Amino acid sequence: MNLSKREFLQVLSAASVAGMGLAQHADADAATAERGLYELPRFGKVSFLHMTDCHAQLLPIRFREPNVNLGLGSMLGRTPHLVGEQLLKAAGVRPGTPLSHAYTYLDFEKASRRYGKVGGFAHLATLVKRMKASRPGALLLDGGDTWQGSATSLWTNAQDMVDACKLLGVDVMTGHWEFTYGMERVKEIIDGDFKGKLDFVAQNVKTNDFGDPVFKPYVIREINGVPCAIIGQAFPYTPIANPRYMVADWAFGIQDENMQAMVDEARGKGAQVVVVISHNGMDVDLKMASRVRGIDAILGGHTHDGVPVPVQVKNAGGTTLVTNAGSNGKFLGVLDFEVKDGKVSDFRYKLLPVFANMLKADPEMQALIEKVRKPYEAKLNEKLAVTDGLLYRRGNFNGSWDQLIVDALMEVQGADIAFSPGFRWGTSLLSGEAITRELLMDQLATTYSYATVTEMSGAMIKTVLEDVCDNLFNPDPYYQQGGDMVRVGGLSYACEPGAAMGSRIQDMRLHGKPIEAGKNYKVAGWAPVAEEARTMPGTRMVWDVVEQWLKSQGHVKARSINTPRLIGVQGNPGLVV
């Protein structure tokens, strides 16, 4: 253990506030901190363990939670659109504690140095085994975005994560970034590696020609004599947010009516508990929960929200719990149900942070990780530069990692402006730490990371920004189709998130001068969804461009983050600047 007596007592105090029964450990020493934080009394007959959006992070990492996660309209001040102290207040967690560090960005750099890294499949495996031992029959559900996000997942064509998930004991999963390996690879894994071991479910993916289900819509598993249905909801906008050619034969969508039909069908087959493993994003899950009856819980993903307290949504059939288990292997959700007279009568829920310093690495999983990484160790560990400032990505508008990327794209390629996609994945790095190739790839590893340079008119630049902004801030969650706002280098602008579509982006300027609608500008970018980008002459991969820039720097100065001037959101509890 790497905790002092004082730190251990803070853990106990924070855990008690969060509702964990730790009184029996009040006089213990630091060696029992692990047992104290992760000892959850069993409740009820049925238990689900939930992980999501690990983005192929096999090793412990650092990950800074956002200080900007705006909720507008009906979502103003509601989970998950709370950050910092507002989130802690809603969860009943004290600032300055390990749980505060896990759930928020507050004092991130100091807290990360103090409490260490989070996640890591070897440490997660230890926690999963502990929870399954205390909850016989518990199922481990994976919300997707599991096979993508690291160098080794890209270089092994996802095989490292497939093998790790099998060893971890995942029972049922759905997907999103998994589809960017292409239809053939996805089916190869499901029909081969997963056959008889792990169920991939998605009620909302059909063939384009005849509308046949591509995957099982749900499975029914018995837990301690209780039939339980797990319905899958893959990311509904995969063909829009990612290249269409990768899933050319498949149609996606939210498909509420079919979801209701699947719930009714599962109930008709005797399911006493029905849960949805979803990759909608939490706002979409909340709306779905209000429209579809008969779902006991939606265990969500995609938006990377660490939600300590489930939202209880009323609907025509009763109440549906909605939650989300963060990202990067940082959390494990534990949902316990009591079932009486054939239906759920009560529940308990805990979102457990995976502190690598407080959980011993599972030897079997550690051995697999070392085996996977061994052929690539030298390449992964090559030092490209040292950062003089904190590097992070998550947040509605920009992050220092994204700023580094757009700065590199502009300088290397001689562009006026640069765009970087609003991806939520990507690990964090503290000031003074080395930027290795592995850490760079944590920000850039996709199957279509082509660097681009195009001529764009000022009018087109505004159209692009307006379109992405509407994907993020449309008042109807069912029209929110992407990640966070595109990150912008060179260009400054103002943004009014609550304005009507077409009116959110204002005062665009380059070097202080207004952008002219009819003038062309040289714009760098990466990860285009258009198929032709991969065949264009002279196309480079984005990591080659950024690596060239890093090696020329040696030490990378702390980034001055280019965020828009925000209008109309002052006082929003999802914003701290």
Image (cartoon, rainbow, N blue to C red):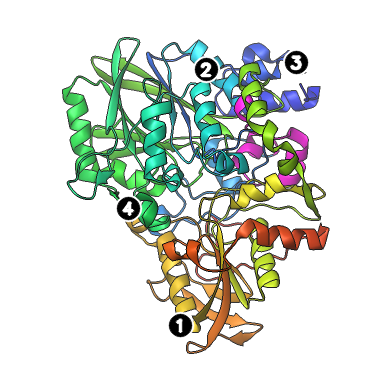
Mark before the other along the chain sequence, 3 or 1? 3
Q: How far apart are the alpha carbons under marks 2 and 1?
A: 55 Å
**Residue 9 belongs to the span the image colors magenta:** no
Q: Amino acid at mark 1?
A: Ala
Element assignment for label 4: loop
Tell me the amino acid under the disc marked 3.
Ala
Residue 172 place in picture, x, y as percent: 39, 27
Classify 197 as above or below 443: above
Contact, mark 3 vs mark 1 (Cβ under 8 Å): no
Q: Quadrant of the image for the C terminus?
A: bottom right
SS category of the residue bearing label 2: helix
Front position among marks 2 and 1:
1
Q: Residue at x 54, y 81 (%)?
A: 507
Q: Is residue 430 left or right of residue 244?
A: right
Question: Is the C-beta separation of discs 3 and 2 under 8 Å?
Answer: no
- Residue at the spot of label 3: 31
Query: SS class of the residue under badge 3?
Result: helix
| Residue type at tag 2 | Met
Give the residue number, with chain letter if any, for mark 1.
459
Disc 4 residue type? Ala
**Alpha carbons under labels 3 and 1: distance apart:** 62 Å
Number of disc labels? 4
